[in-house]
Image: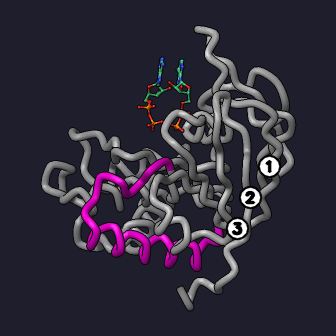
Amino acid sequence: MLALSGVAKRYPNGLAALSGIDLAIDPGAIVAVVGASGCGKSTLLRLVAGLDRATSGTVAVAGHPVDGPGEDVGVVFQEPRLMPWLTVEANIRFGLGRLPKAEAARRAAEAIARVGLAGFASAWPRQLSGGMAQRVAIARALVAKPKVLLLDEPFSALDTFTRRDLHQHLLDIWGWLRPTMMLVTHDIDEALALADRVVVLAGRPGRIVADVAVPLPRADR
Ligand code: ADP
Ligand code: ADP
């Protein structure tokens, strides 16, 4: 589903952020990307999301080279990045391309229910807790039913209990859509709780220094 081959990224200021990245991820896999701050995790995610371009090598999603943000990929960042002047529902509908109104409303309602926010469609972002706002961000990323969900430190601003709650929501969502997930995290416990596979980046430029399967079935962790 995701295929990176010989990927390197050098920023315009000359900083080499990634080098020699070869990575293939199967459909429906949940892969955690871990590593020290500055090793290129966010850069890697942005290349897959089409938010930035590799300096060399190829990045493909579902067999197509990535050449910009597209409907196949949903992204969740550390901050929810909601538009404060739009309701929860309108924020989520922002994640949809052009669709007939009734269909857009149906899709938004489904996504809202899947993240446990039924009843909050007309709420404003400022009325939400941090965990709820992040659930809206997840619903917005999923409303177009993308094949791939990318998450960049999505829970690191949340308290432990909220974080656990969101882990469960994320696994429920995985059971619903089976998206291929790439989860950037500093939290090794989170990686081991959620992922099938953990990829470790290290160095400057960042390279893959380890790539291991998590041996326990998720239900037993
Ligand atoms: P991580 O997510 O692992 O903390 P990043 O991908 O954010 O790492 O950054 C990798 C390296 O690239 C860091 O040294 C960072 O400062 C640098 N970097 C990130 N974005 C840019 C940018 N837009 N321009 C220049 N350097 C950048
Ligand atoms: P994260 O910790 O999630 O990787 P950062 O705080 O490193 O995020 O980066 C936040 C934003 O700043 C990103 O858009 C990144 O590209 C940009 N950035 C990071 N480092 C640099 C840098 N050295 N020069 C320019 N932009 C940077």
- Placement of the N terminus among the 4 image quadrants: bottom right
Q: Is residue 102 visible?
A: no
Q: CA distance from mark 1 to mark 2?
A: 9 Å
The x and y percentages for residue 217 are: 64, 86
Instruction: Assess disc 1: are there few (<14), some (14-19) or many (≥20) residues with their C-alpha within 10 Å of its C-alpha.
Output: some
User: Residue 201 is drawn in which quadrant?
Assistant: top right
The stretch in magenta equals 152-179
- The residue depicted at 58 percent of the width and 36 percent of the height is 39
Counting residues from the start of the chain, the first of labels 1 and 3 encountered is: 1
What type is the residue that disc 1 sits on?
Answer: Leu
Report helix, strand or loop for mark 1.
strand
Judge depth for marks 1 and 3 and give the one in front. 1
Relative to residue 160, is residue 72 drawn left or right? right
Q: Position of residue 169 (x, y in %)?
A: 42, 74
Counting the numbered discs, the total is 3
Q: Which residue is mark 2?
A: 211
Look at label 2 and name its amino acid: Asp
Q: Which mark is residue 23?
A: 1
Query: Mark 2 falls on what kind of element?
Result: strand
Q: Residue at point 23% right, 72% down?
A: 119
